[in-house]
Image (cartoon, rainbow, N blue to C red):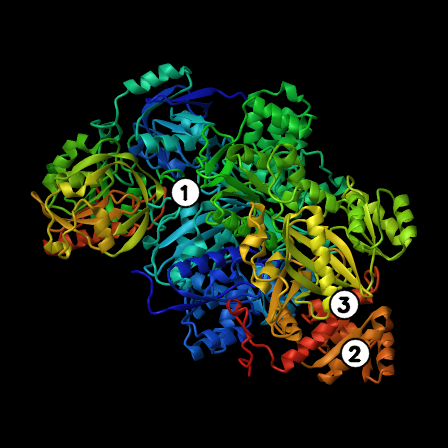
Amino acid sequence: MPRRDDIKKILVIGSGPIVIGQACEFDYSGAQACKVLMNDGYEVVLVNSNPATIMTDPELATRTYVEPITPQFVEKVIAAERPDALLPTLGGQTGLNCAVACAEAGILDAYGVELIGARLDVIKKGEDRQLFAEAMRRIGLEVPRSGYAHSLEEATAVADGLGFPVVIRPSFTLGGAGGGIAYNAEEFRDIVMHGLALSPVTEVLVEESVIGWKEFEMEVMRDRNDNAVIVCSIENFDPMGVHTGDSITVAPAQTLTDREYQMMRDASIAIMREIGVETGGSNVQFAINPDDGRMVVIEMNPRVSRSSALASKATGFPIAKIAARLAVGYTLDEIDNDITRETPACFEPSIDYTVVKVPRWAFEKFRGTDETLTTRMKSVGEAMAIGRTFEEAFGKAMRSLENGRGGLGADGKDSFEEHKFDQFLAVPNESRPFYLAEALRRGRPIDELNEITRIDKWFLGRLAATIEVERSLEGRSLDSLTAEDLYRAKRHGLSDAQIAHLTVSTEASVRAVRKALGVRPTFKSVDTCAAEFAAYTPYYYKTYEDEDEVAVAERPRVMILGAGPNRIGQGIEFDYCCVHASYALHDAGFETVMVNCNPETVSTDYDTSDRLYFEPLTFEDVMDIVDAEKPVGVVVTFGGQTPLKLARALEAAGVPIMGTSPEAIDLAEDRSRFAPILDELGIEYPAAGTASSLDEALAVARRIGFPLLVRPSYVLGGRGMVIAYDEQYLEKYMAEATRISPDHPVLLDRFLEGAVEVDVDAVCDGESVYIGGVMEHIEEAGIHSGDSACSIPPYSLGDDIVARIRKHAVDLALRLGVVGLMNVQFAVKDDQVYVLEVNPRASRTVPFVSKATGVPLAKVAARVMAGEKLAEMSLPPDDRELTRFCVKEAVMPFGRFPGADSVLGPEMKSTGEVMGVAGDFPAAYAKSQLAIDYSLPTGGTAFVSVSDRDKRQIVGVAKHLQLLGFSIMSTKGTARTLRAAGIPVTEVLKRHEGRPNILDEIANGNVQLVINTPFGQETRSDGFHIRSAAIHHGIPNITTLPAAMAVVQAIEAVKEGRLGVCALQDFEGVPTDGADA
Amino acid sequence: MTDRIPAIVAFEDGLVLSGWSCGAHGEAVGEACFNTSMAGYQEVFTDPSYAGQVITMTSPHIGNYGVNGVDMESRGCFATGVIVREMCHEPSNWRSEESLPEFLARNGVVAVEGVDTRRIVRHIREKGAMNVVISTVDLDGDSLVAKAKASPGLVGRDLVSEVAVREPYEWGDPVPGAGLPVDTGVLPATPRYRVVAFDSGIKYNILRNLAEAGCAVRVVPPTTTVDEVLAQEPDGVFLANGPGDPAAVDYLYTTLRGLLGLRPVFGICLGHQMLSLAAGAGTYKLKFGHRGGNQPVMNLRNGRVEITSQNHGFCVDFSSIGPLDVARSQGLEHDPGDLGAWVRSGVAPVVTSDAFGPVQLTHVNLNDMTVEGIRLLDVPAFSVQYHPEAAPGPHDAHYLFGEFTRLMDEARASSNPVNVPAKEG
């Protein structure tokens, strides 16, 4: 049965911004799906609010709507496009929830849109735990005993029948948000209350604990002929109790007999049938009691998921692509396996290597939050590694995390909290693998560690084998090692850096000795079939074996170094740039070689580049690939800080770096060398200094005065960056800074309080400069650019200022000798333009600029790096008038980290971004807010409480709110200011002033909007509690004055019904206003 | 590191690899093959069809969950040799009774670990099946290559007589030669069918599946005559899997010819080749065989794809059975040897055998479009090349045991009702 011809136009809903629990894996799957549907001749209409995705590139769909993923906006798109079908299974939980909402609101029926891929009742049965449990009982499968509760009383009644510990899972929240494990009544009460508050249906599931059981996942696909295949089995290293997104996971399953495996396989397929997933992929999770093999079903997701992205990368079987084709009527046997070409997709991949995924957390950004790993996902990214053995893959994964570690310890960076050692083993946490390794080094038996951690003895045994190899090297000199010693170490996944530490030598010496002894890596293919058939897709991993499979290349190669695991400050934006570089360089005639270790990304799709190396981005691993591929150029400026950090070392090793020279990159980074250049160009910059000690820092402070922006050099995402208002705080900071980054000095800049910040992304070919975009930030200088909203074109800057900014950018690019991308941050204060920072590399805003202007900046830059001139590219004039406003807004993860402050500052904390597009700034800003919070209050009470410096300007905001029909509630100080301006205010007590206070008002639902600006380094203050309460209760929470002004305008735009929808393909036109009633 | 004993793997074409011993000491020669199953090594190594073969497991970690009494597929370990990338010496599983290296050593199976198994797979894939020697005693590559060359191949060799039982027994009674009690699965309280199963190297899970389908099974040596079979008054006859070249097992398919039409017949693997040979087909050796648990097979009678467990190096040539019966092939005139064309048309073609009339192609391997199943249309008999009993592998084709009992039901209905004979003592 071939594809369906009765549908022509398909609506695909993406997953929106990157948030914890829903990252760029949905860009990967969504992009695959859009591509394959377009190739099959369908028209694709896409809705996704995330501009940093490949999926929203205008050529990937017929019509691309960067609009909020809400039923209101999707309805407008449906009304404008009249699609025949809606494919809801590729946009994660967000896409699925929105599709369900559209279906339930009758929108799909009204416009005659068919849900394909999953029917409404199927989604419900998969998602609703009660229906799911009933379905499982019908087919004779066990689920953990459980009960639903809609109140604390009901929950307690259920828990009484189960005994502690119990698991609490709120219904319909993302990534298990609000869930947890309660070991006692007090914890139980807290988690239940929080879960009920977060659940959109005020419902939690209270469930028998299967903590400590072995955890498995199966990735299943089924077609409409009822053919079903298991794409991959995944075993969790961390037993039940830790969210799979926070667990180290291994593919394929390692500790199951065939009987157990087949039992799980049969169950997975039976579940697909019972739930009714007719076409597409699903993920089923199981727990197995390690003591008697009892198997229970935990849950299933009737859609493409994080695990399916991992399974696709782990096996080479493109689940999303095939799911999309199944949804339009193909059957599995009609689809070819891309990799083998000759065999069909209707088979089960066999893999002859081991895959390990390790999560990446960012707790250092969220001080004060609980770092225990639970059923609620907290990681912000992940790295995947492939090795022939688990040991090898595990070692590679541990050094892929971009946390400065050379592997699983033994790298000179081990440090342990001795008094809590066993607690670090027993309670799942980020450092547990290091504690495990250390415990093994200290000779603690596997049986004991298994008792403490419940981690399967097989895994512990593999770690012990690695530790044994490690110990066999320790204390020996590098010269005394034989080829056999080194070979064994490499086969156990030890890095050159670790071997260097163990033998007290250097990484460079280890590499030299290793090569001299002939201990060189080999590269093997990921081919879906364990080499049974020839593979045509050059998707490689490194290992130490006899035979190398790298194919001979026909064209010159360029290597693109990717961005590694997602973390805060380095996310999908850089992957987007790498992917574009790959496309552009392929078109320019090169064979492109992608190197990356992030399984969530489009860059690690075997379809993206001519060759893919799934490898860590360390010097050792990159050089091994350089040795194998002998590239004519390596791109280090597109993948963020990860490849940039390697630039110097690679260049020193004779690797040809493409584009801007590492020397120029350093020049821009080095204050003492860069300041004279700015002076020479006549560009203003804030007074600045560097310091390596407290005394030096204080001297700088005295010279240039407070407030100061203080930060370590060589960081991305503002790690460790603060604003110091006094000497006392500076002292505290310096003590810490030397710990975070001892090798680099601290930079101190005069902080321009209240300045407008402006970002520019530009491309320079050495002769001329193309200004990609001038972005005016909404939040003032001092808020990390990654966390602030910004607008293209600028909404308040005068033409003269913009012209000066453009000129400075051009001068800087030419003077620095930039060949490729450059980002400049400016601050505008009192009509004066200051340069804050210049980075001759891809910035986080490149995808946003590209979407907003229609010029694919990263591609342009890659072509320039390959030698093309801007003048030859017939780009539209970079100073043309843009007919619409595009606003980028950051998405914050504070809801995931109770206890951490949500105030914005110079250290970046956002995980992702959205874009709002409209004919005017307020409407565009409104859309950006709707894309994040899904609603803006249009009436009720606004709580307004601002710091003294904002008091004067808050009057206008409050007045505007009043005009829009809001009542104003304030604490004493702000109330006084507002009353003086003639605005009626209800006064409310601060937290420490008595009860009822503002927290009670928020908790009682009497506040619909919170505007609370902090001052200086207040911690655990009133403001902190107010912001936390707002986040907890899901109330929009504004912490800066400019944002408050913008929000008020946005609310006005919403109330006036000015929010239409428009497709990127219509870019030069006007938004289709009037679609709104 | 514990002291490791070196071992050598040498192929007849000169490829020599070194590794470490992880089974019995000694030397083994056989045909090199590889298996892509990611779980179920115990079932693989105890499958008698692997007699005469040195198995390379493509999955790098082998032995992780140990070995247990329940997962045995026969009375012993029949693989001639085993090659793995990484052997687990300290298994972890609640059912584990013994480590795999201990089990292999106890059963006298030479095994090697630490070699580039993927290289071996690619070598066999490109060069085809060939002889290999693995040794822990002779570490001289040249000498081993010479031994590999000198060894007879599998073609023309009857290995069935080496692995089959010598005495008949009832499934449920002690199995001759099996030291430990055998897991029989659920035996029918009141058997509905009496089946005679020829043991050409039968896997226990076939017997467990037959028992669970309601059959009382008498397992008989492959040399059992037609009269001896009929004396059991069976409702059906089963032909099992087994090792080696099917063409060399002429006594068995000759016997089968005498039984076809008298009793419903179901064959698996070698049993499928026996039925095909009985119907006049030729067989040939595949370049490197199908061995694994992920092989897609299309059932042409319903258009569904089954993921199957397979282990065969020889294959049936469908077109050699006889001329195409166009009328019974929905009027299509594709070449009966071009199985891909029939798959694309979704039609199960029929050819005419001299001895037994129309024979339908029922199952095709979608990877290489080779024959995976046939059915005689005038005689109650069908067979599949793959392993519906799984162990190891998926259970997708379990329905075939039901088809066998249905055939026996039909046969009963069309003739005089046959009383289910009581189990013999």
Residue A350 - label: 1
Both on one chain, marks 3 and 1?
A: yes
Q: CA distance from mark 3 to mark 1?
A: 54 Å
> Is residue A183 in view from this perspective?
no
Query: Between marks 1 and 2, how big is the CA–CA gap?
Result: 66 Å
- Which amino acid type is marked by label 1? Ser
Q: Secondary structure at mark 2?
A: helix
Residue under numbered circle 3: A1040
The image quarter containing residue B131 is top left
Q: Which amino acid does the dot numbered 3 rest on?
A: Thr
Disc 3: host chain:
A
Q: Do marks 3 and 2 both belong to one polypeptide chain?
A: yes
Query: Label 1 lies in what chain?
Result: A
Q: Position of residue B284 (x, y in %)?
A: 21, 35
Would you identify the image quadrant in which residue A647 lies?
top right
Does A153 appear above or below B158?
below
- Residue A806 at what x, y percent from top left? 70, 59
- Tell me, yes or no, whether the two marked residues, 1 and 2, touch with CB atoms within 8 Å: no
Label of residue A956 in the image: 2
Question: Which mark is first along the chain, 2 or 3?
Answer: 2
* Res B82 → quadrant: top left
Residue at the image position 85 percent from the left and 53 percent from the top: A687
Q: Nearer the viewer, residue A455 or A967?
A: A967
